[in-house]
Amino acid sequence: MIDDLDLGFDEAERGEKGRHRRSAVRKRNGKSGGGRGKTIFALLMALVLLGGIGGGAYVGFDRIRNHFVTPDYDGPGTGEALVEVKAGDTLTDIGNSLYDAGVVKSTKAFIEAADANSRSKNIQVGRYKVRKQMKAADVITLMLDPKSRVINGVTIPEGTITLNIYQILSKQTKIPVKDFQDAAKDPVKLGVPAFWFNREDGKKGPKSIEGFLYPSTYEIPPKATAEQILSMMVDEFLRVTQQLDFVDRAQKERKISPYEALITASIAEAESVNAVDLPKVSRVIYNRVYAGKIGCKCLGIDSGINYYLRLQGKDPKDSDDLLQSEINDLKNPYNTHNVAGLPITPISNPGEAALKGALEPPPGDWIFFMTIDQKGTMGYGSNDAEFRQLIRKMCDNKVLTGENCT
């Protein structure tokens, strides 16, 4: 098979992913002596070999040619990544950091793009806000833009609840937490359009800022007020949701209000350890609340109880540590064990993947999701028998203990 032939090109020319060839390019300009000659020789040898076995070798040539094409993304990228350029970093070091962060498809693509852009030598030490899965040439352009450089940056992780966001911001800015709490009392004043609080399920709740403080990395302007900082986060939420066409798609595709879709995304973000589970968890939520898969239409999520505990200044609890009195507390407005439907507000601030997952849940009849091992792997079930199997896995993996496992 032609695929198995060793054509003589060295590792630096293979277009392999950056983490497998950290020492492939040692010079600042990223050039390896003699590499180009080897590539041309190898290509000629491939053509000779292919020519010898006739026209049926075009498919084989296609495969061989892929070895000589530097892996690179085509589009402008999505989401966000924060990458740091340290003092003394070479282009290879920077390329490796970008590759590890999921920004470029290969270190080699970044090095070649830098070679082609004479201004790349002007990339400064510091942290940069870029996007994931970007074309390498676009990464260079973005890193040369002063607006991409984070000078006084603060990062809000996905799924952070609002109370914790205030603490993070306060630590960074020295603005008292109370100032953020006071500024958040009127989300509409911060820029949240009033229609976002409309619901199709008839539930009434407070106009909470929860869910609208988009998790990202922000550069805080000098002397910014608490209100200005929170407004900046709301603006980013509106930008991302507009990019996703979140409002129209929630209404037309999911047949629910955007606010209910946002609440769903916030629950998926709170419940999921791994991003791959975000869409599936959303599907379970929709199956329980809207599709009539269970009689009471109750979510039965512990994250709602824990959110309420946090609002009261208490520590959250593991599922097997929650008391029955806490699970069945009807005074808890976030009780979803005994109360049908979604909670009255979001319970976290979801990121782009969770928002997208709420719009695009995969098909499935699951009505249960559970974390079944210490790695955060999720299991899904559609009936009582599968529920019991999931419980057994949780007990076997020491995720669940106590009377639930007897």
Image (tube, rainbow, N blue to C red):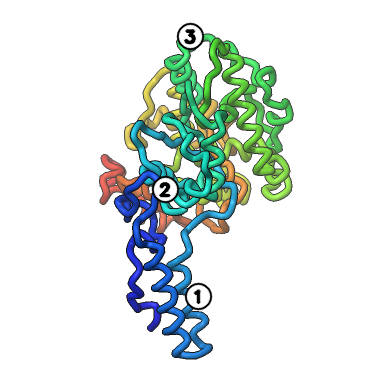
Q: Position of residue 350 (x, y in %)?
A: 53, 36
Q: Residue 390 placed where, x, y %?
A: 37, 53
In the image, is residue 253 above or below residue 335? below
Q: Alpha carbon of mark 1 to alpha carbon of mark 2: how far?
A: 25 Å
> Quick check: 50 above or below 78?
below
Q: Give the mark nearer the N terminus: 1 vs 3.
A: 1
Q: Quadrant of residue 212?
A: top right
State the residue position of label 3. 176
Say which residue label 1 marks: 62
Q: In the visual, does 271 lie left or right of 401?
A: right
Element type where label 1 sits in the image: helix
Residue placed under numbered mark 2 in the picture? 99
Numbered label tally:
3
Q: Quadrant of the N terminus?
A: bottom left
Residue type at tag 1? Asp
Amino acid at the residue labelled 3: Pro
> Badge 1, how many Cα within 10 Å: few under 14, some, many 20+?
few
Compare marks 2 and 3 and give the one earlier in the sequence.
Answer: 2
Q: Is residue 31 above or below residue 166?
A: below
For badge 2, the amino acid type reads Tyr
